[in-house]
Amino acid sequence: MSECRAALGNAPRVFDRETERFLLVNPPWITKLHFGDALAKLVQNSTLRNIFRNGHVVWAHIIQANMELYSPAPPDDSYTYDRPGELVFSPGVSRFVAPSVLEDVASELAGLKYAPNIGADLQPWADYLNAEMTRVAGWQVPDRLSRSSTCFVSTTLFRRRHLPDGVLRQPILPIVVAPKQPYFAMPLPKTYWPTSLLKWWSHNG
């Protein structure tokens, strides 16, 4: 994680025009998103600029993602095959939350989709995950699921060009999180990953 943070640099960050174009999103389907949709807000240029210029680099665990992301995209216009997914993370940089902790929280959350009699406080989570088209930004995980760690869930957009090999191969990855609520989050592009992380991602999928 320290290598990822060093590669992206300290906030506030300044990017040249070419890098900024690489970080921004412009797939054609964006215009079809409904106003107020958290994903629509995430992919706005102003939101993405804030994330990458001022955000924190932390670990995240995938709760669920569009299944197309686990297979290669067609070679032409692969950006049209970017897809959303749900991440759990802890946004603070002063207290490190290990990937193993995030894995446990992600498992607890995913289990709500099929658990009976979960109670009124957890039912909205089950409904959200089962719907698969509901998007959130900075939704705090209930204490009884996250235990000693303060965790949040946000919908993200997995960009093929930012992923090693353009495919999801691992459930853990570094992300960049907005510095304050709502905690919009984007995967850290592979350009800023150390060699060891790139090898782990690609060789153990």
Image: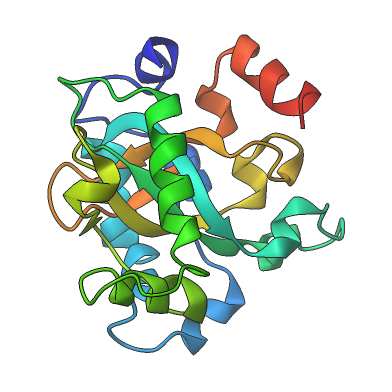
Specify the farthest residue to the front. Answer: 117
Which residue is nearer to you in this view: 185 or 153? 153
Percent position of residue 178, x then y: 23, 46
User: In the picture shown, does residue 26 fall above or below 49?
Assistant: below
167 on left or right of 49 = right
At x 35%, y 49%, the residue is: 185
Closer-to-camera residue (185/27): 185
Identify the residue at horizontal 43%, vertical 19% (top origin): 4
Direction right: furthest residue? 75
Q: Position of residue 175 (x, y in %)?
A: 41, 37
**From the image, which quarter does the N terminus lie in?**
top left
Residue at horizontal 64 percent and vertical 64 percent from the top: 66
Q: Is residue 178 visible?
A: yes
Q: Position of residue 63 (x, y in %)?
A: 50, 53
Asked where in the image residue 135 lies, by quadrant, the reply is bottom left
Q: Residue at x 47, y 41 (%)?
A: 61
Figure label count: 0
Horizontal and vertical percent for residue 87? 43, 50
On the question of residue 16 being in view, the answer is no
Of residue 54 and residue 119, the one placed in the foreground of this image is 119
Tell me the colour scheme of the image: rainbow
- Side (left or right) of 183 relative to 48: left
> Which quarter of the image is occupied by the C terminus?
top right
Rendering quarter of residue 154 = bottom left
Relative to 45, residue 127 above or below: below
**Position of 78 compared to 189: left or right?**
right
